[in-house]
């Protein structure tokens, strides 16, 4: 899962251990390529690998090229596709095509730049690694690329030679209300790559018996949200439909950078919520950030189905930036 994607950290550790290391990055895909642009594979001089660029079908060929690149100290652009003889041998005969950029650490991608990238990731600071694949110019920046940062979307710029690799903090989901729906939502969120945290001041709801092994804060939601911190890689889901619990957390979220806010409740309940926040002085644009009733309208009835609708809506906002009309 993406939240366990620590490939740059592994490559840096291998390099510093004297093994030599290479980073292979998917820079372009067509058709049914199984891994998205920006996916990475780390290869050590000893043939160790972590991560993937294709889900397993071209890794062997990439490792061979990476070890040769490490030996000569130069970057390589690799391409595998349906018209490639190698592609049939490594498993891309289904029609997918991928381009993979191979960069030896030290000779091509400097140790200092990789260390700076790793430090930014550790600090939950979004950065873009920008490389001109023709000239070899490389920079790290947290400026510009706002759409790419919001969509978590790496790719080539319009010039066809400037590749932007987006490194964003791991996704988090803050769930207010350790209710029945949350019991289904927490494992779904984890499977989708989120790090979920529950907030509920009611000990009988937020118990390890009901949520074994999960992070639970027995705070009032406004205190829990404040302690947790809200950023552009955080989704907030409010499941109590109790204004005493939901509203204080909502007040903080509406003036934060969270990418998704969902609140449980009927259309009538949400209309009353809107009235309360208008009275508090929130603008129509701020209030419009709330997805209420929470979740895509898929006719969900059971707690698990409602949780599924929430994850679907959250994913649509994350990846598309909006909810598409039916």
Image (cartoon, grey):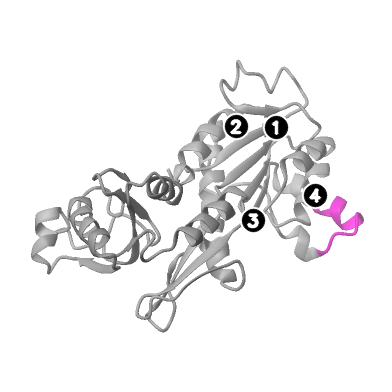
Q: Name which of mark 3 and mark 4 comes first in the sequence.
A: 3
Residue contact between numbered discs 4 and 2, judged by CB atoms under 8 Å:
no
Left or right of 167, for residue 255: right
Apparent side of residue 34 relative to residue 201 in the rendered image (left or right): left
Mark 3 and mark 1 in contact (Cβ < 8 Å)?
A: no
Point out the stretch of residues depicted in magenta.
274-283
Most extreme residue toward the front, as rendered?
A: 18
- Relative horizontal placement of residue 131, taking residue 145 as reference (left or right): left
Where is residue 286 drawn, in percent x and y?
A: 77, 61
Q: Earlier in the sequence, mark 4 or mark 1?
A: 1
**Magenta stretch, main secondary structure class:** helix
Q: In front here: 73 or 214?
A: 73
The mark nearer the N terminus, 1 or 3, is 1
Report the mark closest to the observer, 1 or 3: 3
The dot on residue 232 is 3
The circle drawn on residue 181 is 2
Residue linked to disc 1: 177
Most extreme residue toward the bottom, as rendered?
159
SS under mark 2: helix
Q: Nearer the viewer, mark 4 or mark 1?
A: 4
């Amino acid at each position: 899962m993406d939240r366990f994607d620590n490939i740059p950290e592994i490559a840096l550790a291998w390099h510093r251990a004297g093994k030599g290391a290479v980073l292979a990055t998917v820079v372009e895909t067509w058709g049914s390529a199984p891994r998205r642009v920006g996916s990475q594979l780390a290869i050590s001089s000893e043939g160790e690998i972590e991560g993937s660029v294709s889900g397993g079908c071209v890794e062997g060929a990439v490792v061979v090229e990476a070890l040769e690149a490490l030996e000569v100290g130069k970057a390589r652009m690799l391409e595998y596709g349906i018209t490639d003889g190698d592609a049939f041998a490594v498993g891309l005969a289904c029609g997918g095509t991928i381009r993979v950029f191979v960069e030896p650490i030290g000779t091509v991608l400097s140790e200092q730049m990789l260390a700076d990238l790793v430090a930014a990731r550790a600090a939950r600071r979004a950065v873009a690694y920008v490389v001109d694949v023709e000239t070899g110019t490389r920079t790290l920046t947290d400026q510009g690329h706002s759409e790419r940062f919001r969509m978590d979307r790496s790719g080539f710029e319009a010039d066809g030679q400037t590749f932007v690799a987006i490194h964003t903090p791991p996704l988090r989901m803050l769930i207010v209300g350790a209710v029945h729906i949350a019991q289904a939502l927490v494992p779904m969120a984890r499977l989708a790559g989120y790090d979920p945290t529950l907030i509920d001041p009611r000990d009988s709801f937020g118990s390890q018996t009901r949520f074994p092994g999960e992070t639970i804060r027995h705070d009032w939601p406004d205190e829990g949200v404040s302690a947790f911190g809200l950023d552009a890689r955080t989704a907030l889901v409010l499941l109590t439909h109790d204004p005493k619990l939901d509203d204080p957390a909502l007040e903080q979220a509406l003036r934060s950078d969270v990418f998704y806010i969902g609140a449980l409740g009927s259309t009538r309940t949400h209309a009353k919520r809107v009235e309360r926040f208008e009275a508090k002085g929130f603008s129509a644009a701020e209030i419009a950030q709330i997805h209420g009733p929470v979740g895509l309208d898929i006719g969900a009835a059971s707690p698990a189905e409602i949780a599924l609708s929430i994850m679907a809506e959250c994913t649509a906002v994350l990846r598309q930036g909006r909810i598409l009309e039916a």
